[in-house]
Amino acid sequence: MADTAHYGLRRWELPDSLVPEAQWQAHRAQLEAHEVFHDFEMQRRGADGHVVWVSVSGEPIHDAAGRFTGYRGVARNINARKQAEAQIERLAFYDELTGLPNRRLLLDRLDCAVTACTRDGSHGALLFLDLDNFKGVNDTLGHEWGDRLLVQVGARLTACVRASDTVGRLGGDEFVVVLRGLHTVETEAAGEAEAVAHKMLLALNHVYDVHGLEMHSTPSLGIALFSGVAQSVQELLKRADLAMYQAKAQGRNTLCFFDPDMQAAASARSALEADVRQGLQRGEFLVHYQPVVDAEGHVLGTEALVRWQHPQRGMVYPGEFIALAEQTGLILPLGRQVLRAACVQLAQWNALPATAHWSVAVNVSAQEFRHPEFVQRVLEVLHDTGAPPAQLKLELTESLLLHDVEDSIAKMQALRTRGVGFSLDDFGTGYSSLSYLKRLPLDQLKIDQSFVRDVLTDPNDAAIACTVVALARSLGLDVVAEGVETAGQRDFLLRNGCRRFQGYLFGRPVPAQDLRVR
Ligand code: C2E
Ligand code: CA
Ligand code: CA
C-alpha cells in the first residue's frame, strides 16, 4: 500500500485502516476521478486498539494542482450491523457445535469442487464419515459427553486435510469431507483419497480425553470420487453414503470406495503397503547397480536402483512399489536404506584403485527431498559411511524441483558445498523451463529413456535428444543418455555430442559384486 502515500490520506484513512488492496484500488480510482463516493465500508483500528467497522461517504478534495488533499464527508460506525451479519452467516452456514461448515455450505463447496474439476481435469473426492459407537456414548454418558466427543472429532478431521479441502458436519455423528485438486489419473486420485482417509481413520482411532475421561471411538468411512463429468452433488452424497454403509457392513472402523474396482484396488494397495512395511523390517530391500560409461565404454560410475527380494514373489522391481511407498510415506525409511547401502558401496569402491574414481547416483523422491531434515540426513550418512561426497550424485526430477524452487536451491547449495552433485533425471518429460533450469545448481542432465528408445526411428525424439545435449552443453552440464540398448543408438548420440551412456548395451543393473571393472 506504499503508493497510497502520495494521496496524502489523513484522518480516518490510511495508518489505522485495514482495507484489502483490491478494495483500495477501486477506491483510489474513484478519488482520481474526483467522484463522490457512498458507503465505503472498511475496518479501522480505533485509538483504544479495537478494530471497528465504519462506512464512509464523501467527496475527495483536491488542491489547485489537482493533488488529493483529503476528504469532506462522514464516517458512520457500523460495527453492530457487521456483527449481526457475521452472526447470521455463522448460523446459516456453520454448525453451532463444532464450528464446521454445515450441510448447506458443504453442498455449496462440493458444487464448487465439481466445477473446478471440470475446469482443470483434476479429480475430487467426497468422504462420508459416521462414528461407529456414537449412540452408545450418547445413551450411556449423555448428550453433553457426546457433544464434546464430536467437537474433538471435527478438530482431528480438520487437522488431516489441506486448507483447500472442506470438513463439515451434516448433523448427528455424520461428517463429510470434500477433497479437491487430486490427480488427473483416476487410479492415482483414488490412491490419494485413500491416503487421506487412512490418516483420518488413524487420527480418530486415538484415545479421546473428554474432561479427564478416556473415550474410544472409531469411524466408518465411504469414499466417492468425482471428476469433470457433471455429477449432481446429491448423487455424490448418496454414493459416499452407500460406500460408508459398505464399510459398516465390513466390520466397521474401515473405509470403502463406492466404485467396486476402486475398492479392489484399494484392498490390494493396503495389502501391498503392509507387505512393504514388513519387507523394510525384514531387510528384504537391496540395491543393484547399473554402470554409466563414457564414449570408450569405460565405467565412470553407477546408478543405484532398489530391488525387493520378496520371500514369495521373488525379485520385485521398483515400478511395483515406489509409487505406493511415496503415497504412504514409506519412501522415507526406504530411501534412507538405499542411500546408506549406496554410500557403503561407494566407500568400498573408493578404497580400491581400479574403482576409486567411480561415482554413485541415488534416486531421490519428492517427499524425501522436501523433508526438512533431508540435507542433514544425507550428510549424516556420508559421515557414517565415509563415502566421498564428491562422488555421490543425487538424481532429482523436474516436478520435484519446481514445487518450491527457492527451497530446492537452498538444499542443493547446502549439499553442494560439501561436494555432493546433482543430476536432473528423466529430462524432457516435465515442463522443462529454461529460466529456472539456469538457476538450479545442477551438474548433469539425464535424457529420458523414452527419447533414446526411438532416437533412430522418430525424428521428433531425435530432435529432443539433440536439443537436450545442446542445452546441457550451453549450461555447462554433463549429459547422460539413459536406456541405450543398441550400438546404433549409442553411435547416433555420440555423433550428436553425447559422451555418457547408461543402458542394457553396457550392462543391466546387477549386485555390486557382479559389476565388471572395465
Ligand atoms: P530411473 O531412475 O529412470 O531408472 C532407470 C530405469 O531404467 C531402471 O528401472 C533401469 O533398470 C531401467 N533401464 C536401464 N537401462 C535400460 C535399458 O537399456 N532399457 C530399458 N528398457 N530400461 C533400462 P528400474 O530399476 O525398474 O527403476 C525404475 C524407476 O524406479 C527408476 O527410474 C526410478 O525412478 C525409481 N527408483 C529406482 N530405485 C529407486 C530408489 O532407490 N529410490 C527412488 N526414490 N526411486 C527409485
Ligand atoms: Ca534415475
Ligand atoms: Ca531416469
Image: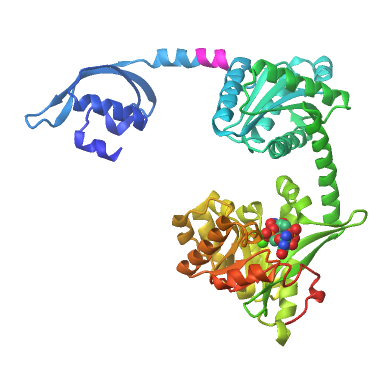
Left or right? Give the position of 12 relative to 505: left
Percent from the top left, x then y, of residue 76? Answer: 30, 15
Left or right? Give the position of 226 relative to 37: right
Seen from the viewer's position, the closer of residues 365 and 51 is 365
Rendered view: 469 above or below 179: below
Query: Which of the 4 image quarters holds residue 55?
Result: top left
**Residue at figure coordinates x 39%, y 26% from the top left:** 50
Left or right? Give the position of 346 relative to 513: left
Percent from the top left, x then y, of residue 31? Answer: 21, 26
Q: Is residue 91 magenta?
A: yes
Query: Which of the 4 image quarters holds residue 215?
Result: top right
Rendered view: 173 above or below 287: above
Rendered view: 483 above or below 19: below
Q: Quadrant of the N terminus?
A: top left
Percent from the top left, x then y, of residue 230? Answer: 62, 22
Seen from the viewer's position, the closer of residues 386 and 487 is 487
Colour scheme of the picture: rainbow
Query: Which of the 4 image quarters holds residue 133?
Result: top right
Seen from the viewer's position, the closer of residues 279 and 209 is 279
Q: Is residue 30 magenta?
A: no
